[in-house]
Image (tube, coloured by chain):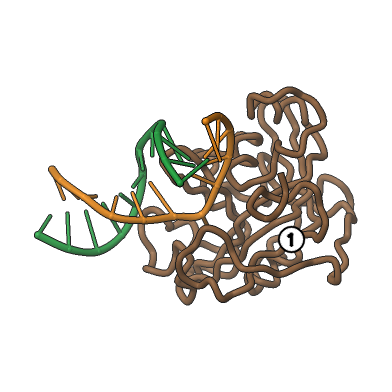
Chain colours: A brown, B orange, C green
Amino acid sequence: MSMDTPLPRSFYTRPVVTVARQLLGKVLVRRYGRALMAGMIVEVEAYNGADDPASHAFRGRTHRNDVMFRAGGILYVYFTYGMHFCANVVTGREGTGSAVLLRALAPLEGVRAMARHRSLPATPDNALLSGPAKLCQAMKIGREENGTDLCGERIWIEDRGLTVPPRTIIALPRIGITRGKEKQWRFCVAGSRYLSRRAGGS
DNA sequence: TCTATGATCGTA
DNA sequence: ACGATCATAGAG
């Protein structure tokens, strides 16, 4: 698949754990003004709709989580802890309520812009995108991006051939939840230095 | 109305 | 270990 070609909508209309694993190695691209920012996905978590007690969708469709229940291939952005945004890739068909939380990216493009957004010096830095709220701050993803079509021109995910072999993917329990802890639905690129702090990164 | 609580992060 | 800081949902 060539550069600048968003993944097709069919990529997202599959079981959420499948999508989560296959998102590792894919590249999230964000156009913001003149800035083009990009990073390779190295850590994600799957949230399995109404069947998953750890998911925002567990208690059914509400105003807050409405975007989660739409057809896959869009972004679900939510506000948490009174100060942070987190971004999810919605999966499945209309009414499913499943999504993949983007937890960490390896910086590829737009490092200067992302560092500025994070109030950090523009030096090689593994703290730019190493956490779900950090990557939103770096890439300027907030309330306005909730519901953004990932097959559009502002935010998309593409395949640059940075394949992550299945054997280098590790599955672990999800982070920061009180229920559903037994599921190992957090997927990381083993050994990446860009994982989130709580995953063993910086 | 009122309250508890986060799919967090930075600093101590 | 803790403070910052607030939308959401459920209870009264």
Which of A188 and A17 lies nearest the eye of the viewer? A188
Q: Position of residue A110 (x, y in %)?
A: 77, 31
Q: Amino acid at mark 1?
A: Cys
Q: Position of residue A14 (x, y in %)?
A: 66, 72
Q: Name the residue: 63% across, 72% down.
A: A184
Which of A172 and A56 lies nearest the eye of the viewer? A172
Relative vertical location of residue A105 with respect to residue A66 in this rendering, above or below: above
- Quadrant in which residue A65 is drawn: bottom left
Q: Is residue A45 left or right of residue A159?
A: left
Which of B12 and A7 lies nearest the eye of the viewer? B12
- Callout 1: residue from which chain? A
Q: Is residue A109 left or right of residue A58?
A: right
Mark 1 sits on what residue? A188
Would you call the spot at circle 1 few (<14 residues within 10 Å), some (14-19), or many (20 or more)? Answer: many
Q: Callout 1: helix, strand or loop?
A: strand
- Quadrant in which residue C9 is drawn: bottom left
Q: Name the residue: 65% across, 36% down.
A: A139
Q: Position of residue A39 (x, y in %)?
A: 77, 43
Relative vertical location of residue A13 with respect to residue A111 in this rendering, above or below: below
Which of A157 and A43 lies nearest the eye of the viewer? A43
Quarter of the image with the N terminus of chain A in it: bottom right
Q: Name the residue: 76% across, 40% down.
A: A38
Quarter of the image with the C terminus of chain A in it: top right
Q: Name the residue: 82% across, 31% down.
A: A124
Count of numbered badges drawn on the protein: 1
Q: Position of residue A194 (x, y in %)?
A: 76, 47
